[in-house]
Image (cartoon, rainbow, N blue to C red):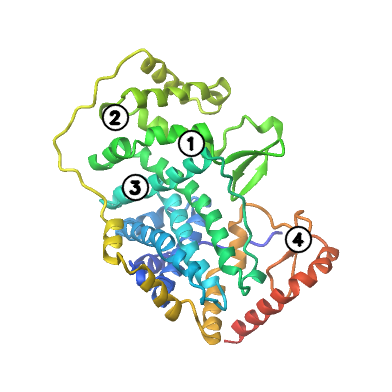
Amino acid sequence: MAAPGPAPLLPAEAEALVQALRGTELRDTGGQGWLRQHECVEKLNMHAILSASAGQEQLLIELLVSYGKIPVLIGELISVEIWKHKIFPVLCRLEDFKPRSTFPIYVVLHHEASIINLLETVFFYKEICESAGDSILDLIDYCHRKLTLLAARSANGQIVTLVELRPEDLPNPSSMQELQQQAETMEFEISLKALSVLRFITDQVESLPLSALTRILNTHNLPCLLVELVEHCPWSCRQAGKLKKFENGTWHVVAPEDQVKMTKLDGQVWLALLNLLLSPECQRKYHFNGFNKSQLLKLRAFLTDILIDQLPNLVEMQRFLSHLAVTEPAPPKKDLILEQVPVIRDHILKNNAGKWEAIAKHQVKHIFSPTEEELKLQARRWAQTYSLDMMEALAPDKPRCRVCGVEAAKRCSRCQNEWYCTRACQVQHWQKHKAACNLMAGTLGRVGSL
């Protein structure tokens, strides 16, 4: 009989973590107080995924709504995005910064992925979207920035490949370059999560504030941006004559018989377009000028019978586009309103303008240059947060052999980090793995004795 997997948090534990969520200052990113917030987010993220898979996520939804924590999460998401674009490049340029371990910096980079993943899981629910309040404007702008970058890179033919950040690379002088590569890969995956969040926001288009709808349709012209994603499909590419698609965190070669199947990401784009173009309120407010109309009509080439069979609602899209092709919709009625604007990002940028290098140097001195003893203490907290059993339960795929890549069932007994299919592969990899294994096994031993 198989051992039961890790269980979601108890209600009291989940409530304590939600209550503990707080906003942090950009200068304190990576510090002890910030790390406590990261641990809360990481545990809630894992709890949300496990609860959703068991159909028990309603309690977490109620907690986030009742304690008003969605605006807090959105604020932290934007704060770490700014850190990544303003502070992280300065850290990479500092010639005298040679960190003992780059993992503390990696945790900050990973924080953005943790928050957007949590938001993706919970934004399916209408009450979550409504509880965002005015911060929904900042989240819409955030999603627009991510999708614009995604579309631009795809239009330029840039393909994101996965770069593994191996533990044995972390102490090396080149590890900051490794982190930069890892950040690029992470940015791609974060953008895909932002697509899902945006689609869930469009599900609630009828109940969105008027200013939110204005930003979606007119300020950012998201319908045309979504058309670009349909055209260029950033999660699909051809390499060596084979079609690859990005799903569940990795690129897969697609079998010929599956090449016409709609992926989850394809579905998110089409559903968002359906929500925006077929809503009477959106049709009334969207400006179907010559450019917008020509862009939207490009979708007709993609609406094949095979696609419509997989998402029958697209029949309505097909009818709408056929009607649009032969009509000239009236210009949108201009409402005399005081439009709200997003404030979170502008507030952070204004408060820290001209201080980026000073903040980076402060963080190098006080946060990212820990002593050996501080690293040991932090290792204990990381071990508690990133439970191996929990991470394996959340992984979409089974572990692969470090040497040959086939499905693996054996793990290094000393460091618990590497997987192998056979003893022969483990022996073959030992010389490369030895230094990292000794480092990690020693750390685990010290953590256990604390």
Query: Residue 413 in the image: x percent, y percent?
Result: 74, 73
Secondary structure of the residue carrying numbered label 2: loop
The quadrant of the rendering that contains the N terminus is bottom right
Q: Which mark is residue 134?
A: none
Q: Which of the marked residues, 4 or 3, is nearer the chain's N terminus? A: 3
**Residue type at numbered disc 2:** Tyr
Query: Residue 412 in the image: x percent, y percent?
Result: 74, 70
In the image, residue 167 above or below residue 123: below
Query: Residue 204 in the image: x percent, y percent?
Result: 34, 39
Gap between marks 3 and 2 measured at Cα: 18 Å
Gap between marks 1 and 2 measured at Cα: 19 Å
Q: Which residue is mark 2?
A: 286
Question: Badges 1 and 4: C-beta atoms under 8 Å apart?
Answer: no
Q: Which of the marked residues, 1 or 4, is nearer the chain's N terminus? A: 1
Q: Which residue is mark 3?
A: 141
Secondary structure of the residue carrying numbered label 1: helix
Q: Which residue is mark 4?
A: 409
Gap between marks 1 and 4 measured at Cα: 38 Å
Residue shown at the point (37%, 64%) measured from the top left: 18
- Horizontal side, residue 417 vs residue 127: left or right: right
Secondary structure of the residue carrying numbered label 4: loop
Q: Which of the marked residues, 3 or 2, is nearer the chain's N terminus? A: 3
In the image, residue 409 above or below residue 168: above
Residue shown at the point (75%, 54%) measured from the top left: 407
Q: Which mark is residue 229?
A: 1
Secondary structure of the residue carrying numbered label 3: helix
Question: Badges 3 and 1: C-beta atoms under 8 Å apart?
Answer: no
Residue lying furthest left: 336
